[in-house]
Image (cartoon, rainbow, N blue to C red):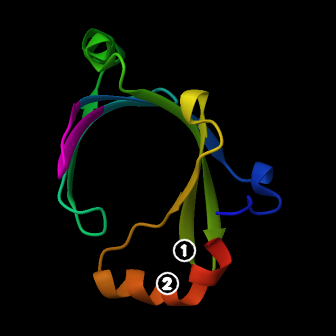
Amino acid sequence: MKQLPPGLEKFPREKIAQGYLVVGKDSHVRLRKRGDVCSLTYKRGPARAREEREVALTAEQLDTLWPATKGRRLTKVRYEMPWNGWNIEIDVYRGIHDGLVVAEVEFRMKEAARNLNRRIGWALM
């Protein structure tokens, strides 16, 4: 994105802390604290069509595993922005990744992703 959407601050947002236990070419395992919700997530496959499994953790479980993520952590603020029936997640990174902004929409079908990309690709580039 070249610029943040106007009025982004009025949309719901959450601070997220993530740490990676495993980072591979086609898979990774991460820990995440989003508000009061803690989880461990496994993702495998290419970004546009990947398998994802998430397991809820207690805060104590997350705290036990967190030291293993040293050197592979990030923080961001995630905004939830509705747009024409879609929910766009806009992540604004902090810390060592300050200035990075990523917009993401999740789809059940690849064709829906292609259709949306044709509709708004110009607006987000």
Provide residue 82's location: percent of width, then percent of height.
63, 68
Give the vertical position of 73 relative to 60 (above or below).
Answer: below
Q: Residues within 10 Å of mark 1 (few under 14, many from 20)?
A: few
Q: Main secondary structure of the magenta part?
A: strand
Name the residue type under label 1: Trp
Image disc number at residue 86: 1
**What kind of element bears circle 2?**
helix
Name the residue type under label 2: Leu
Quarter that holds the N terminus: bottom right
Provide residue 38's location: percent of width, then percent of height.
37, 28
Residue name at image x 45 percent, y 89 percent = 115
In the rendered structure, the answer to whether residue 50 lies left or right of residue 120 reads left
Judge by depth and name the residue closer to the eye, 122 or 65: 122
Provide residue 90's location: percent of width, then percent of height.
59, 55
In the rendered structure, the answer to whether residue 21 lies left or right of residue 39 reads left
Residue name at image x 49 percent, y 84 percent = 116
Quadrant in the rendering for residue 14: top right
Quadrant in the rendering for residue 41: top left
Residue name at image x 34 percent, y 16 percent = 70
Quarter that holds the C terminus: bottom right
Marks 2/1 in contact by CB < 8 Å: the verdict is yes
Q: Residues within 10 Å of mark 2 (few under 14, many from 20)?
A: few
Distance from Cα at disc 2 to Cα at disc 1: 9 Å
Would residue 16 be seen by someone viewing this image from the given angle? no
Q: Earlier in the sequence, mark 2 or mark 1?
A: 1
Judge by depth and name the residue closer to the eye, 21 or 35: 21
**What kind of element bears circle 1?**
strand
For label 2, the residue is 116
Nearer the observer: mark 2 or 1; the answer is 2
Q: What segment carries the magenta color?
A: 22-30
